[in-house]
Structure formats: C-alpha cells, structure tokens
Image (cartoon, grey):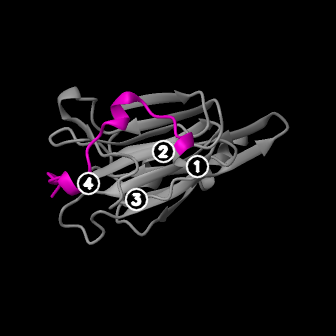
Amino acid sequence: MFFARAAARPMDIKSTNIAGVAVIKPSRHFDSRGHFVETYNERAFQAAGISACFVQDNLSFSLKRGTIRGLHFQLPPSSQAKLVRVVRGSIFDVAVDLRARSPTYGRWVGQHLTAAEGEQMFIPAGLAHGFCTLEPNTEIAYKVDAYYAPECDSGLIWNDPILGINWPVAPEDVVLSERDGGLGRFSQFDSPFQ
C-alpha cells in the first residue's frame, strides 16, 4: 500500500524563466516508519519535456557554510545536463544560460534546494552550474547525462560582474577551491553552445 500510493503522482515539475531549467518537487509519502520518495521518474520527466538519459551519479560534500562550487560546465562534445538535489543541508543552486542563440543568454536563475523539502533542479546542457552551501556539512547528489571528460572541463568565475549573481553570502565569507577562484570571465567567453 505504501508504494502504491507513491506511484500515483511522483513529482511536481515547474519550468523557470530560462528554457529547459526546471524545479522538481518529488512527492513524499509518510507513514509511521518515516517517508518514501521517488527522486527520479523517467516517465514524469519525459512528460515534462526532459529527455536526459543519465549515465553517472556524483556526490559532493562541503564542510563549511558559504562554500561556492562553480560555475562549472563541460564543453561539447561532452556537455552535460544535470539533476541536482541536496541529501543533507541546503544550498542556493544557480544555472547560467551559455547557449549562444538563447534569448536568455548570459542570464541566471537561482533556487534554494534543501534536504528537508527535497527540491531538485534540472539544468540542461549548455548552462553553467554552481551552488553556495547555506549550512555546514552539506551534501549534494547529482546525476549527469555525459561522463566526466577532463579535457572538456571548463567554468566561469563565481562573482563575474556581468553575470551579477546574487549569492547569499558576503564575498569575504566565501570558501573557494584554488581552481574555482581562477576561472575565466564571461566577457572573454566564446560560447560553443549553439
């Protein structure tokens, strides 16, 4: 009975102001033991126009609040779509449109994702992705539809003035890797995403 109820309506999928980026809220089904949730359902995603075929799962753990990871993406031919969710803690998740012919090229969308509520964000290929942890000991799980390809790995600096992302952390409190601190600027980016 517990699982039969879960199959009725597995998730609510809403679009954002950037084409292809979606916020997903899986349904949780509670009983005396706790809850059950489908975090991914191919039929529900396809019905919402999301056709990514995921090939790899990744897990990211950040010790400190204010950790920013990103803005990352893989270049063609290994560009990736991502499905991001929080396993523990909370984040401000960001996607930046890098598709050259998109009407929202250079614009970003942000969404709070929490383990407590179970929200997810789908980010199609051709967008940069980054997040800021809002709590210590935050853990992120995400699916990608292309394997990691180090020769295609790229990114943009988190605080690029043209992008103007409103991160929920003071610049002096940001925790960055050396690599992320040295990523390039949007003004120098020549998009390969058509």
The answer to whether any part of residue 40 appears in the image is no
- Magenta stretch: give its range: 172-194
Q: Nearer the viewer, mark 1 or mark 4?
A: 4
The spot of residue 34 in percent (x, y) is: 78, 36
- In the image, is 41 to the left or to the right of 187? right
Element at badge 1? strand
Pointers 1 and 2 in contact (C-beta within 8 Å) = yes
Callout 2 environment at 10 Å: few (<14), some (14 to 19), or many (20+)? Answer: many
Q: Tell which of 130 and 10 is nearer to you.
A: 130
Pointers 1 and 3 in contact (C-beta within 8 Å) = no
| Quadrant of res 73 | top left
Q: Which numbered marker is on residue 169? A: none
From mark 1 to mark 3, how far is it between C-alphas?
A: 14 Å
Instruction: Point out the image quarter for the C terminus.
Output: bottom left
Q: Could you tell which of marks 1 and 4 lies nearer the N-terminus? A: 1
Label 3 sits on what residue type? Val
Q: Look at mark 1 in the image and give the residue it sits on.
A: 113
Q: Look at mark 2 in the image and give the residue it sits on.
A: 131
Residue sitting at the far bottom: 103
Callout 3 environment at 10 Å: few (<14), some (14 to 19), or many (20+)? Answer: many
Whether 133 is drawn above or below 43: the answer is: above
From mark 1 to mark 4, how far is it between C-alphas?
A: 25 Å
Specify whether residue 61 is painted magenta. Answer: no
Pointers 1 and 4 in contact (C-beta within 8 Å) = no
Q: Which numbered marker is on residue 21? A: 3
Label 4 sits on what residue type? Phe
Q: Could you tell which of marks 1 and 2 lies nearer the N-terminus? A: 1
From mark 2 to mark 3, how far is it between C-alphas?
A: 15 Å
Q: Could you tell which of marks 4 and 3 lies nearer the N-terminus? A: 3
Label 1 sits on what residue type? Leu
Q: Nearer the viewer, mark 2 or mark 3?
A: 2
Label 2 sits on what residue type? Phe
